[in-house]
Image: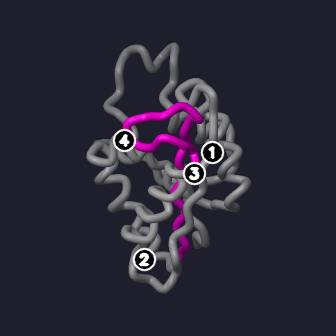
Amino acid sequence: MFNKIMVPVDLAHLDALEKSLTVAADMARHYDAALCYVGVTTSQPSAVARTPEEYKTKLTAFAREHAPDNGHSAAAAVYNSHDPVADLDDILIRAIKDVKADLVVMGTHLPHHIDAIMPANGSKVAAHSDVSVFLVRP
């Protein structure tokens, strides 16, 4: 049913993504699908990485460590942005096509009133892509 599952990952907030990462790995096992972890970073040094290349190295290592045991090796894709917060939705929508994902599993936050005027990333990705999006609350 699903061949490639895309999982957005923020290496600075892995604790908050624990449930969505577990769900993605379980779904990859169930559907015998490949996983692709997608990260967005900036050229500016951060607490996670000093450069986009270092970020990619760390995300690739993360993908190897968290790949489900279903025979598929997990992939990592990193996108560079001057403003990752503002560009995140557009980058994730582009990444879906780039990695040829047919399912996106992503963590979300608990709903807030502000979501009515500023939708969460998951709802925007679902509205602007033609693949299934599975949102996992913390």
Quadrant location of the N terminus in the rendered image: bottom right
Instruction: Check whether the beta carbons of the residues at disc 4 and disc 1 lie within 8 A of each other.
Output: no
Q: Is residue 119 above or below residue 68?
A: above
Position of the C terminus, as image quadrant, is: top left
Q: Tell me the kind of residue under disc 2.
A: Arg
For disc 1, the neighbor class at 10 Å (few under 14, some 14 to 19, many from 20) is: some
**Residue at disc 4, secondary structure:** helix
Please provide percent x and percent y for residue 134.
47, 51
Q: Are marks 4 and 3 in contact (CB under 8 Å)?
A: no
The residue labelled by disc 2 is: 29
Specify which label sits upstream in the sequence, 3 or 2.
Answer: 2
Residue beneath the point at 60% across and 34% down? 89
| Image position of 1 with respect to 105: above or below | below
N-terminal of the pair, mark 4 or mark 3, is 4
Write down the region rendered in magenta. 33-53
Distance (Cα) linking label 3 and label 2: 29 Å
Q: Residue at x 54, y 39 (%)?
A: 41
Q: Are circles 1 and 2 on residues that touch, CB within 8 Å?
A: no
| Residue shown at 49% from the left, 76% from the top | 31
For marks 3 and 1, the one nearer the N-term is: 3
Estimate the spatial distance between the alpha carbons at disc 4 and disc 2, rounded to whole Å: 26 Å
In this rendered view, identify the residue nearer to me: 34 or 55.
Answer: 55
Q: Which mark is residue 12?
A: 4
Residue 45: say if magenta. Answer: yes
Local secondary structure at mark 1 = strand
Q: Amino acid at mark 4?
A: Ala
Residue at image mark 1: 79
Left or right, 132 with reference to 13: right
Is there any visible trace of residue 49 in the rendered image? yes
